[in-house]
Amino acid sequence: MTRKMLDTILPWQVVTSSVTYEDRWLRIRSDHCLTPRGVQVNPYHVIEYPNWVNVVALARETLQLVLVREYRHGRREVVTGLVSGTVEPSDAAGAADPAESAARRELCEETGYNAGELKKLLVSYPNPANQNNLVISYLALDLVLGGDRLLDASEDIEVVLAELPEVMLRLRSGELRMQAMHVAALWSACAHIIGSDNLTAAAVALREKLVTALGVA
């Protein structure tokens, strides 16, 4: 694919736009669009979410992966996944990076762990076809257990410790299913660990296990 070919893709023109639904969680914007070829697309619904965060949290010393299990009504299943959540307006108060503030808050609220260090792994689009938000994923290290969990009234969350190489093997085999952006964050975390030169002895051992499990040459 050449640069010239990419330049032929142009954005749609928004003729009119209106908010057709809004609550505390999301807003639905309905656009009347006109494509560069003159095709009218009306309505085109866009879901406006706040930005989301994912946290790949590794316990201090053991470097076990901190996962959460909770009921997800969309699938009507109990699903295992990463600590995750929404960047809230309060996360921006006095914070240089609201997403990092949200990641620290969600980690403590869901698990009781506080992170000594956060590394930004990945910024991606959950679904750019009809969502406008970003998802920002972090690697949390030097965890200290001692914060107060603060769950919403509708939340019932079980905290699970797992070996990261085993989780990756179970994902690859299809034995374990997770939300897609959690999987992307986990692969990014593995790439970071495998490619890093500045690792503790425990992290070096984890890297060796990941290389073996994932068949990285």
Image: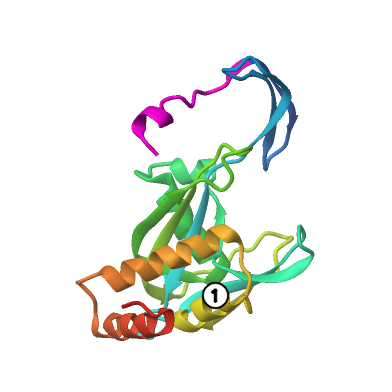
On the image, which quarter does residue 156 sit in? bottom right
On the image, which quarter does residue 138 sit in? bottom left
Residue at image location 60% in from the left, 63% down from the top: 150
Do we see residue 99 in this rendering? Answer: yes
Along the line of sight, the residue nearer the viewer: 60 or 45? 45
Residue 131 coordinates in the image, percent (x, y): 61, 39
Task: Describe residue 152's horizontal placement relative to residue 64 as left or right.
Answer: right
Residue at image location 37% in from the left, 28% down from the top: 4
Magenta residues span: 1-14
Along the line of sight, the residue nearer the viewer: 81 or 216? 216
Helix, strand or loop at label 1? It is: helix
Residue 39 coordinates in the image, percent (x, y): 67, 18
Determine the residue located farthest toward the right in the rendered image: 76
Residue 211 coordinates in the image, percent (x, y): 35, 80
Residue 169 coordinates in the image, percent (x, y): 51, 80
Along the line of sight, the residue nearer the viewer: 2 or 122? 2
Q: Is residue 137 magenta?
A: no
In the rendered image, which quarter contains the N terminus?
top left
Residue at image location 57% in from the left, 36% down from the top: 132
Q: Where does label 1 land, which residue?
A: 172
